[in-house]
Amino acid sequence: MEHYYQKEIECASREQILEIQNQKLKEQVQHVWDNVPYYRKKMEKAGVSPSDINSVEDLHKLPFLSKKDLRDAYPYGLCGVPAKDCVRIHSTSGTTGKRVVAFYTQGDIDLWEDCCARAIMAAGGTADDVVQVSYGYGLFTGGAGLHGGSHKVGSLTIPISSGNTERQIMFIRDLSATIICCTPSYAAYLAESMKEMGLKPEDIPLKAGIFGAEAWSEEMRKDIENTLGIKAFDIYGLTELSGPGVAFECCEQNGMHINEDHFIAEIIDPDTEEVLPEGSQGELVFTAIDKKAFPMIRYRTRDICKLSREKCSCGRTFVKMAKPMGRSDDMLIIRGVNVFPSQIETVLLEHGYQANYQIIVGRVNNTDTLDVHVEMTPEMFTDNVMDITKAQNELVAGLKSMLGIKAKVTLVAPKSITRSEGKAVRVIDNRKI
Ligand code: DLL
């Protein structure tokens, strides 16, 4: 039986949803015009004012917001309410120095947790479930979002955060966790560890998993489902739009319903910025219509995907987004963590290397691998294994502290990495997703 957290809205007619969107959009544009001088200037430059926006049809008149705007306006420039009315921030791992910092009022958190509660119930969760939240807690939105959603559903919540695999497995078994929330790569790692322990799907009390924050394939879904004996559901979101729960999968498991009473989605051509017709592949753009502290209008996510309005057997009427196929910028997501080549470059340069390096990303047993090949400078060049190992270890530590994840570093001889005459190819992503 399909469970809903807010059935009336999740299954509302298209007309009802449009009515809500039109109303909220008008209010949001006025709010931003009145309270966010940064965006008001953009509107003025584009020759548009709140009186021009009467419905979703007028959305295309509004200027886009991009990651660059977020950096330029860092930290408070896009805040829609005074800091005293905000109760929390979350933040992405970001590039060197300037992270994206998102603000929340209590009302914003409430709406966000509703979105996560919808995702948990769509995955079959009820107040009878034990939900193990194994996303990271802290600045990352994964832990806090699913935690709040689980409370709203009334499930028993285990705020275990990520890491410490043995303890994860112990709690799943001892407390009879029925739903686990974590990145798909961590789920795959947990599944592998349980298999190694000789545990069969019937020995594991889990029935469902809610996995997101990074791209994952259907093949990976099948592997995780078979090893853990669960149904694996996708969940999508980003810090700028509150966090997980912007979109979530239902029992059909073929695309994620976008919470359209809170977010209006568009697909654009990333180069021309032209809005594309339904069903086209392009960059996903979101307008958050009721978030007050961080009111993103036409925010360019850089995620490439498609939208579909085909009728869904779950009864929900919200538009569905396909799994994002990649990003139009250079950010890598490795084991759920955002990694920019520029961060790696910064560490290398700090340690006296030159920008002659290559980042090789792969996937072994469903877990992302990050290998960094770095050229020694002629001055550093040595064939003393002890010296090389020491230098490699120093870089591994430097990268761990910058990125928060472990990379494998291999020092290679000077001039052994191919030089490019045009743009340098820094990243080789061998993951097939
Ligand atoms: O990853 C929020 C989140 C937490 C989503 C937990 C789901 C579960 P950020 O760290 O700001 O926020 O990263 C956002 O991650 O633009 C996508 O590129 C990618 N992403 C998120 N969910 C998915 C997914 C969180 N289900 C960026 N599939 C987004 C593919 C995803 N990519």
Image: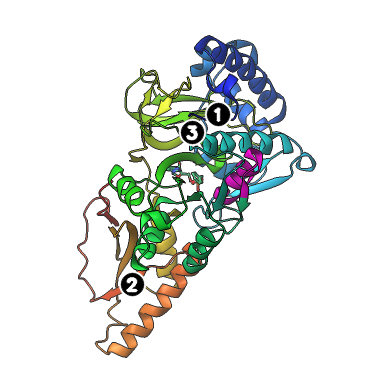
Q: Which residues are magenta?
A: 141-156
Residue at the extreme front of the image, as rendered: 202
Q: Is label 2 in a helix, a strand or a loop?
A: strand
Tag 3: residue type?
Ala
Amino acid at circle 1: Tyr
- Find numbered disc 1 in the image and state the secondary structure of the residue it sits on: loop
Residue 385 in the image, given as x and y percentages of width and height: 28, 88
Locate residue 24 relative to residue 192 in the image: left or right: right
Quadrant of the image occupied by residue 158: bottom right
Q: Residue at x 37, y 81 (%)?
A: 391
Mark 1 vs mark 2: in front? 1
Q: Cα distance, mark 1 to mark 2?
A: 47 Å
Query: Which label sits on residue 409?
Result: 2
Q: Which mark sits nearer the N-terminus, 2 or 3?
A: 3
Labelled pair 1, 2 in contact (Cβ < 8 Å): no
The quarter holding residue 150 reads top right
Residue found at the far right of this picture = 84
The residue that label 1 is drawn on is 4
C-alpha separation, residue under disc 3 versus residue under disc 1: 14 Å
User: Nearer the viewer's eye, disc 3 or disc 1?
Assistant: 1
Task: Please identify the quarter of the rendering in which residue 104 is found.
Answer: top right
Amino acid under disc 2? Val
- Residue 247: mark: 3
- Numbered mark located on residue 426 in the image: none
Disc 3 or 1, which lies upstream in sequence?
Answer: 1
Magenta-highlighted stretch: main secondary structure?
A: helix
Q: CA distance from mark 2 to mark 3?
A: 36 Å
Judge depth for marks 2 and 3 and give the one in front.
3
Residue 334 in view of the camera: no
Q: Where 14 sits versus 77, above or below?
A: above
In this view, the residue in front, 372 or 247, is 247
